[in-house]
């Protein structure tokens, strides 16, 4: 049954994180991550889910996109990213909210949106 | 992690921002996201948030962690170092916990309403009035290009506070959607200015 397969995959994913569902980093759904110094050997030693994540992040990508593309739940993605970030294998980009959406950022966003409606 | 010390002008540092698109079922959220997104709206059904309190995350009988929720999001690269994400909220009211997660860090929300079924968006407006502190604007989606009711009548019917911006848009139209988003950003800027 597909349902059973889904269920066992979920159990496996949470087992992968050791049941952890929280992370030490401030990871929002739109938070971008990237790989600063790609290391193929490091990648080949990772578990499949982390490897897939590490490979995808060679090109800057958001946490929500990673979750959708790899069909890994958001909570699990956050834990896996935290582990890689703690080893300095992944860089967590700041978001607009990290700057309290200061005026410079809001103006840049407004300018960009004006180009879309021009 | 404190990110406030990162240089803003670094060309290698791409940052992201988020706007939440809320409203009831069938009011046009996905259409709105799709009209300006540079990729087709990403629909995820495999979405699962962190386990709720007191829930064993590996318990297969737990319904809280095995819930799948459909939601859409889109992306607009505004500048080489600035990406804006638009997240549509799941319509069902039982996913409020997911709304909290989605709204965290958002610069604001656009609540989309359809005047033929205003009540579909009541819950979203209540949420932003009472349970969230992010700025929000309300946009009346004009499916047929015409506004059937006066905007002030709509404001009254929604019991909307006078300071909440109320506007119209055609969610199918990129330019119109972009103007609604501009309205929100301008409103967020005005609120930021009043809290120095």
Image (tube, coloured by chain):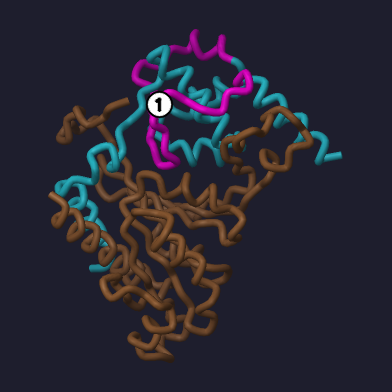
Chain colours: A cyan, B brown
Question: Residue A89 versus residue B164: which sits nearer the camera?
Answer: B164
Residue A93 in view: yes
- Total number of numbered discs in the rendering: 1
Q: Is residue B136 above or below residue A75?
A: below
Residue A101 x, y percent position in the rendering: 23, 46
Q: Is residue A105 above or below residue A59?
A: below
| Residue at the extreme right of the image, as rendered | A1
**Does residue B81 appear to the left or right of B110 in the view shown?**
left
Q: Quadrant of residue B117?
A: bottom right
Q: Residue at x 37, y 81 (%)?
A: B155
Quadrant where the N terminus of chain B sits is top left
Question: Residue B138 versus residue B75: which sits nearer the camera?
Answer: B138
Please tell me whether residue A28 belongs to the stretch shown in magenta: yes
Residue A108 x, y percent position in the rendering: 19, 51
Parent chain of label 1: A
**Does residue A62 appear to the left or right of A49 in the view shown?**
left
Question: Residue B69 versus residue A24: which sits nearer the camera?
Answer: A24
Q: Is residue A13 above or below residue B144?
A: above
Q: Residue at x 34, y 62 (%)?
A: B136
Q: Quadrant of residue B63?
A: top right
Q: Main secondary structure of the magenta part?
A: loop
**Circle 1 is placed at which residue position?**
A25
Q: Residue at x 55, y 20 (%)?
A: A51
Please tell me whether residue B70 belongs to the stretch shown in magenta: no
Q: Residue at x 39, y 31 (%)?
A: A26
Residue A69 in view: no
Magenta-highlighted residues? A17-46
Residue A79 x, y percent position in the rendering: 52, 25
Mark 1, Cα crowd under 10 Å, few <14 / some 14-19 / many 20+, is some
SS of the residue under disc 1: loop
């Amino acid at each position: 049954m597909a349902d059973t397969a889904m269920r066992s995959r979920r159990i496996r994913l949470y087992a992968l994180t050791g049941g952890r569902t929280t992370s030490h980093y401030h990871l929002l759904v739109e938070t971008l991550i990237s790989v600063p110094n790609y290391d193929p050997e490091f990648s080949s030693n990772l578990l499949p889910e982390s490897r897939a994540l590490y490979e995808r992040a060679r090109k800057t990508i958001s946490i929500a996109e990673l979750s959708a593309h790899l069909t890994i739940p958001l909570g699990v993605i956050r834990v896996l990213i935290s582990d890689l970030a703690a080893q300095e294998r992944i860089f967590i980009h700041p978001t607009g909210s990290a700057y309290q959406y200061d005026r410079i950022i809001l103006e840049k966003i407004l300018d960009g949106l004006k180009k879309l409606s021009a | 992690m404190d990110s406030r010390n990162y240089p803003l002008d670094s060309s290698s540092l791409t940052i992201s921002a988020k706007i939440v698109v809320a409203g009831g079922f069938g009011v046009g959220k996905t259409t709105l996201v799709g009209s300006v997104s540079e990729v087709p709206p990403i629909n995820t059904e495999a979405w699962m948030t962190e386990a709720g309190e007191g829930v064993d995350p590996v318990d297969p009988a737990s319904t809280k962690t095995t819930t799948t929720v459909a939601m859409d999001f889109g992306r607009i690269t505004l500048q080489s170092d600035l990406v804006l994400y638009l997240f549509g909220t799941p319509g069902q009211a039982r996913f409020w916990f997911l709304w909290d997660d989605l709204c965290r860090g958002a610069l604001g929300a656009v609540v989309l309403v359809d005047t033929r079924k205003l009540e579909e968006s009541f819950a979203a407006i209540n949420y932003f009035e009472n349970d969230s502190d992010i700025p929000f604007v309300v946009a009346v989606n004009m499916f047929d290009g015409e506004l059937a009711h006066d905007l002030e009548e709509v404001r009254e019917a929604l019991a909307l506070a006078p300071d909440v911006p109320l506007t119209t848009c055609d969610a199918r139209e990129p330019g119109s959607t972009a103007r609604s988003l501009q309205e929100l950003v301008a409103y967020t800027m005005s609120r930021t200015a009043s809290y120095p």
